[in-house]
Image: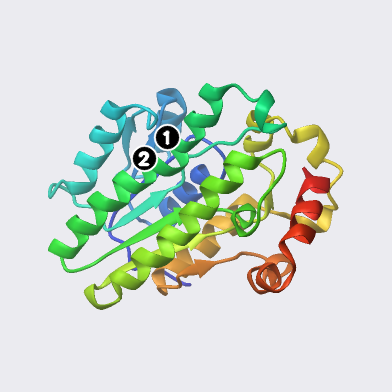
């Protein structure tokens, strides 16, 4: 798209990876952004590059952090009309070997905070007669992923939840999309502990973070319920429905 219909955006998880690329793409297009993350130093460096950027330090695994961001979403002062729920993390390895705090932390960040902020945004945007919500999911949500069991399950929730909210708001000028990328080279791999193994993944399957961000922004502007970037993954939603689940489990287990 040559331009975007957004007047102001709020991006969670904006200090690195795809979240940072959302900010760069929107900033370059002249769209002011509220950038949200725990790492305030990175946010301030990012905000200094563009006009009209705001920094909001918040930990979205914490009730106070969720409340602070929800209040900014609802504010009528410099109101936002695009919420990008990008914050999230994963862990790798057999589920029983994962610290329970890491497992439940993924649910808190990937699901609980996303639901809370989407709820606030839908109500605010309906009252303002329009807005956009982009929830960052993953192709991992199309099937179970052994050794990333909780992460894949959270992304399955995000995709299903987003589709439902998309349909509920079809007649209310609130556009809701799920962005489902495949392999993207970011800090995510190091945090989840799969960097070494994923380096063996064929280069052709890797996507660039800025291209993923652009695909997501274009998709939500066009009100696409599901956005799958990259020709490599375009048929995956259909294939995942037609392929026996035990086959998908085995394939996913071999990759991760």
Seen in the image, is 209 located left or right of residue 42? right
Q: How is the image coloured?
A: rainbow
- Indicate whether 173 appears above or below 149: below
Seen in the image, is 61 located left or right of residue 236? left
User: Which circle marks residue 139 in the picture?
Assistant: none
Give the mark nearest the N terminus, 1 or 2: 1
Q: Helix, strand, or loop for circle 2?
A: helix
Q: Which residue is mark 1?
A: 108
Q: Marks 1/2: CA distance?
A: 6 Å
- Indicate whether 130 appears above or below 57: below
Residue 84: image location, x then y, percent: 40, 51
Residue 194: image location, x then y, percent: 74, 34
Q: Residue furthest bottom?
A: 171
Specify whether residue 157 is in view.
Answer: yes
Residue 127: image location, x then y, percent: 13, 62
Task: Tell me where residue 8 sits by quadrant.
Answer: bottom left
- Indicate whether 162 appears above or below 51: below
Seen in the image, is 219 located left or right of residue 190? left
Q: Residue at x 30, y 75 (%)?
A: 170
Give whichever of 73, 33 is nearer the camera. Answer: 73
Q: Residues within 10 Å of mark 2 (few under 14, many from 20)?
A: many
Number of numbered callouts drawn: 2
Residue 55: image location, x then y, percent: 33, 34
Q: Residue at x 69, y 47 (%)?
A: 145
Q: Which residue is mark 2?
A: 113
In what quadrant of the picture does the C terminus appear?
Answer: top right
Give whichever of 162, 134 is nearer the camera. Answer: 162
Task: Tell me where residue 92 sits by quadrant.
Answer: top right
Q: Are marks 1 and 2 in contact (CB under 8 Å)?
A: yes
Q: Residue at x 79, y 60 (%)?
A: 247
Give whichever of 139, 52 is nearer the camera. Answer: 139
């Amino acid at each position: 798209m040559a331009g975007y219909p957004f007047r102001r955006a709020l991006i969670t998880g904006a200090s690195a990876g795809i979240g940072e690329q959302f900010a760069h793409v929107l900033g370059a297009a002249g769209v002011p952004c509220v950038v949200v993350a725990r790492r305030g130093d990175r946010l301030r460096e990012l905000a200094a590059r563009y006009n009209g950027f705001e920094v909001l330090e918040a930990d979205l695994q914490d009730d106070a952090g969720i409340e602070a961001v929800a209040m900014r979403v609802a504010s009528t002062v410099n109101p936002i009309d695009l919420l990008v729920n990008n914050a999230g993390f994963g862990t790798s390895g057999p589920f029983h070997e994962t610290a329970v705090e890491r497992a439940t932390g993924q649910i808190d960040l990937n699901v609980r905070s996303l639901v809370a902020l989407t709820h606030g945004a839908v109500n605010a945007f309906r009252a303002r007669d329009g807005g956009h919500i982009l929830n960052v999911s993953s192709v991992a949500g199309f099937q179970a992923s052994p050794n990333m069991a909780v992460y894949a399950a959270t992304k399955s929730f995000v995709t299903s939840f987003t589709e439902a909210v998309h349909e509920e708001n079809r007649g209310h000028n609130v556009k809701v999309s799920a962005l489902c990328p495949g392999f993207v080279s970011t800090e995510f791999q190091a945090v989840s502990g799969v960097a070494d193994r994923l380096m063996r993944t064929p280069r052709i399957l890797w996507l660039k973070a800025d291209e993923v961000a652009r695909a997501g922004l274009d998709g939500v502007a066009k009100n696409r319920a599901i956005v799958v970037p990259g020709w490599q993954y375009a048929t995956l939603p259909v294939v995942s429905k037609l392929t026996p689940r035990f086959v998908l489990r085995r394939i996913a287990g071999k990759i991760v």
